[in-house]
Image (cartoon, helix red, strand yellow):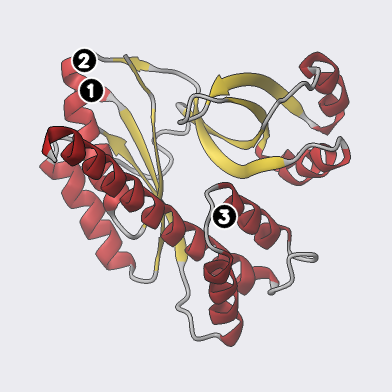
Amino acid sequence: MGRAFEFRKERKLKRWSKMAVQFTRLGKEIVMAVKAGGGDPNTNSRLRTAIQNSKAVNMPKDRVEAAIKRAISRDEKDYEEIVYEGYAPHGVAILVETATDNINRTVANVRSYFTKYGGSLGKTGSLDFIFSRKSVFTFEPGDRDLEDLEFELIDAGLEDLFVEADENGNDIAVVHAAFEDFGKMQKAMEEAGLEVKSAKLERVAQSFHEVTEDQVTDIMKLIDRLEEDDDVQAVYHNMQE
């Protein structure tokens, strides 16, 4: 079968591994949403958003329903959301969002990753000047006139609208709005007839730190290890090659 088979096998295994991590994180988000606002997505906007995001990554419907049932039955653990901030090697800022049922385990793990890969963990709020929290939505642009759409969404708090390539090389439109305008923008996009693929509160870098190709390799060792941890929901950085 040779090298081509082994290469395809490796790519498939990596894709499955990535999907498993996404499903675990979305499962946690669904549980937290249900515990905070109940199991009806019609009255719980956070749950409605989590279900929407699960569809965007093709998470099986039975896994979504199972997570909702576990949270409603109170059998599922309670998760606490904690943010860790620090620096990777070569001065790149790293912000880590976690959801954990054991804070001591999580902080010990996160600290050990920073130490092992040449970084340093900082104090809460130390990266506020680098990252701002934004409402980020994506949708397939199709034949939609984006200039006209900008005017439709500006009253809902639109800050930016642009098109980029997704991981498959297809065009995806991205909308940025302020953190506090999440609900208003989500409603406006639905009223505009847009099929939102994902809706998230993300950390967006306001300034960037340039690095060389060799330095990227060092930094990605830390980022990859953080993203492998079951307690980690998202990792953000301000690296620019």
Which quadrant of the structure image shows residue 121? top left
Please identify, in this view, whether the residue under mark 3 or under mark 2 is nearer the observer: 3
Distance from the alpha carbon under mark 3 to that under mark 1: 30 Å
Q: How many marks?
A: 3
Q: Give the image location of residue 226, x and y in percent.
A: 28, 47
Image height of 143 relative to 222, above or below: above
Identify the residue under disc 2.
213
Name the residue rendered at 28%, 45% in the picture.
14
Name the residue rendered at 54%, 39% in the picture.
202
- Neighbour class for label 2 at 10 Å: few (<14), some, many (≥20)? few
- Helix, strand or loop at mark 2: helix
- Helix, strand or loop at mark 3: helix
Name the residue rendered at 33%, 30% in the picture.
93
Identify the residue under disc 1.
216
Q: Earlier in the sequence, mark 3 or mark 1?
A: 3
Labels 1 & 2 near each other (Cβ < 8 A) = yes
Please identify, in this view, whether the residue under mark 3 or under mark 1 is nearer the observer: 3
Name the residue rendered at 80%, 65% in the picture.
42
Regarding residue 89, the answer to whether it shows in the image is no
Distance from the alpha carbon under mark 1 to that under mark 2: 5 Å
Regarding residue 174, the answer to whether it shows in the image is yes
Q: Earlier in the sequence, mark 3 or mark 2?
A: 3
Q: Amino acid at mark 3?
A: Ser
- Residue 41 vs residue 127: left or right? right
- Helix, strand or loop at mark 1: helix
Residue 16 tag number: none
